[in-house]
């Protein structure tokens, strides 16, 4: 695909380890020459993310807990100093407490509900607002990651489904805000894939088997497929697309029974 991103810069939020979809996005963008900043959420992840960043060409790595506004401010201050401008933002941040991802949704605590929304939905808007000054005049592209549990009931996904619905609606409102500035924002709705987030989710293997048996492509997706869709959304090839949710799910979302 002719999508050379040399002279473009991007920041990727939400890399936890090599299985992270945010990492797949980083690799696809790096392969086309984009200069990247990766952020990590908490000291526990720092060493691993720094090690991954060594695989990229000249990437920088910064701490960022998206619930701390001063952390987000600091990321964009450093990007301004190091890169001078910004073309792409990849938002792959999500969190919910383990106990909220099982059983009946109505047991969701107020605290768990708020936390899931703060990290998984509000953070996109908090980040986008701070990215705008650095994207000025550059036709920027913002990409976030979502899951079909936002629009259909997926057992156990629970509060994350509500948070992803808010995230997808945020994409539409942000698209309307930033479109006149020449910028775009879209979501990738990825099929299930074994990542750190998915680990420990009860019955996850059954979900993967179900997709392999029933999706139009009769297989599960790969991280690389998500990464390359992110590359498309950050490249000029997708210049007419904004406010959309693009499915990278082997076609599963079209199926009824
Ligand atoms: C989070 C988690 C966001 C898991 C996620 C997620 N987006 C997709 N997944 C995978 C998944 C999870 C469940 C599921 C189906 C897919 C974990 C906590 C952090 C946020 O339900 C059947 C629960």
Image (tube, rainbow, N blue to C red):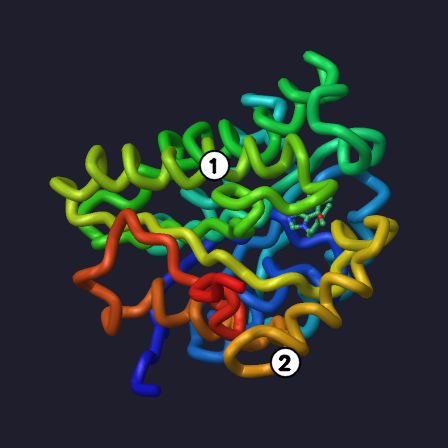
Closer to the camera in the image, 25 or 61: 25
Residue 235 lies in quadrant:
bottom left
Find the residue positioned furthest to the front. Answer: 257
Q: Residue at x 23, y 59 (%)?
A: 241
Q: Is residue 113 visible?
A: yes
Q: Residues within 10 Å of mark 2 (few under 14, many from 20)?
A: some
Taking the image as shown, residue 227 lies to the left or right of residue 194, namely: left
Closer to the camera in the image, 35 or 185: 185
Q: Disc 1 marks which residue? A: 165
Q: Residue at x 32, y 48 (%)?
A: 185
- Mark seen at residue 127: none
Find the residue positioned furthest to the bottom. Answer: 1
Q: Disc 2 marks which residue? A: 219
Residue 207 position within the rendered picture, expressed as x and y whole percent measured from the top left: 73, 62
Find the residue positioned furthest to the left. Answer: 180
**Label 1 residue near ligand 1, CB within 8 Å:** no
Residue 169 lies in quadrant:
top left
Residue 89 position within the rendered picture, expressed as x and y whole percent measured from the top left: 43, 50
Taking the image as shown, residue 247 lies to the left or right of residue 104, namely: left
Q: Residue at x 45, y 57 (%)?
A: 188
Taking the image as shown, residue 188 lies to the left or right of residue 8, namely: right
Assess whether mark 1 and mark 2 are in contact (beta carbons under 8 angstroms).
Answer: no
Label 2 secondary element: loop
Q: Residue at x 85, y 50 (%)?
A: 202
**Which of the two discs, 2 and 1, labels the residue nearer the N terminus?**
1
Residue 197 position within the rendered picture, expressed as x and y whole percent measured from the top left: 75, 50
Closer to the camera in the image, 170 or 91: 170
Label 1 secondary element: helix
């Amino acid at each position: 695909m002719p999508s050379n991103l040399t002279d473009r810069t991007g920041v990727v939020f939400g890399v936890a380890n090599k299985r992270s979809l945010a990492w797949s996005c980083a690799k696809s963008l790096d392969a086309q020459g984009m200069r990247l900043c990766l952020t990590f959420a908490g000291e526990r992840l720092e060493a691993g993310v720094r090690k991954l960043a060594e695989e990229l060409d000249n990437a920088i790595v910064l701490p960022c807990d998206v619930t701390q506004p001063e952390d987000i401010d600091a990321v964009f201050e450093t990007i301004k100093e190091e890169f001078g401008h910004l073309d792409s933002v990849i938002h792959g941040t999500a969190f919910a407490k383990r106990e909220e991802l099982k059983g009946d949704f109505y047991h969701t605590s107020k605290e768990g509900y708020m936390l899931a929304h703060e990290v998984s939905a509000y953070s996109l808007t908090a980040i986008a607002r701070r990215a705008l000054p650095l994207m000025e005049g550059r036709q920027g592209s913002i990409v976030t990651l979502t899951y079909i549990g936002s629009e259909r009931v997926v057992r156990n996904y629970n509060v994350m489904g509500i948070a992803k619905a808010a995230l997808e609606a945020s994409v539409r409102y942000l698209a309307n805000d930033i479109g006149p500035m020449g910028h775009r924002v879209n979501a990738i709705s990825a099929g299930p894939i074994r990542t750190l987030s998915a680990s420990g989710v009860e019955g996850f293997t059954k979900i993967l088997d179900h997709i392999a048996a029933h999706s139009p492509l009769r297989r599960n997706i790969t991280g690389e497929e998500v990464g390359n869709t992110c590359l498309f959304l950050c490249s000029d090839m997708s210049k007419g697309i904004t406010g959309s949710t693009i499915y990278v799910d082997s076609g599963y979302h079209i199926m009824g029974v």
